[in-house]
Amino acid sequence: MVFSQGIALNQYILHVQADQLKKMCEFQRWAFGAKQLFIIAQCNNKEKKTNQVFYMFFCNL
């Protein structure tokens, strides 16, 4: 599997552990049978508590 960060929808940096992203990709492939797909990762920004950070990751399965 190859993980490449896609489009950042804002200026904040989201750190995602490789094993977590791998599990997400494996689940998506199992659930949908997709060879290529986009995963939206969401996290809360600690500096600005009301903001949520969205990143798009492309999984090449």
Image (cartoon, grey):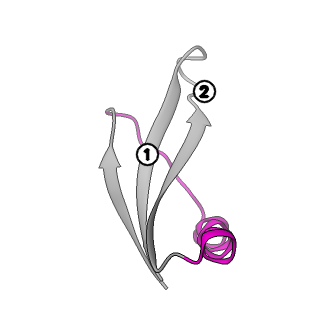
Q: Which residues are magenta?
A: 11-33
Q: Which mark is residue 42?
A: none
Q: Residue at x 33, y 36 (%)?
A: 9
Q: Position of residue 48 (x, y in %)?
A: 53, 17
Foreground tag (2 vs 1)? 1
Q: Position of residue 38 (x, y in %)?
A: 44, 60
Dot 1 amino acid type: Tyr
Q: Quadrant of residue 47?
A: top right
Tell me the element at label 2: loop
Overall secondary structure of the magenta section: helix
Q: Quadrant of residue 50?
A: top right
Dot 2 amino acid type: Lys
Q: Is 28 on the left-hand or right-hand side of 52?
A: right
Check disc 1 and report the residue beneath it.
55
Check disc 2 and report the residue beneath it.
46
Q: Position of residue 21 (x, y in %)?
A: 59, 66
Q: Is 61 on the left-hand or right-hand side of 16?
A: left
Q: Is 6 on the left-hand or right-hand side of 20?
A: left
- Magenta segment: does it hold 44? no
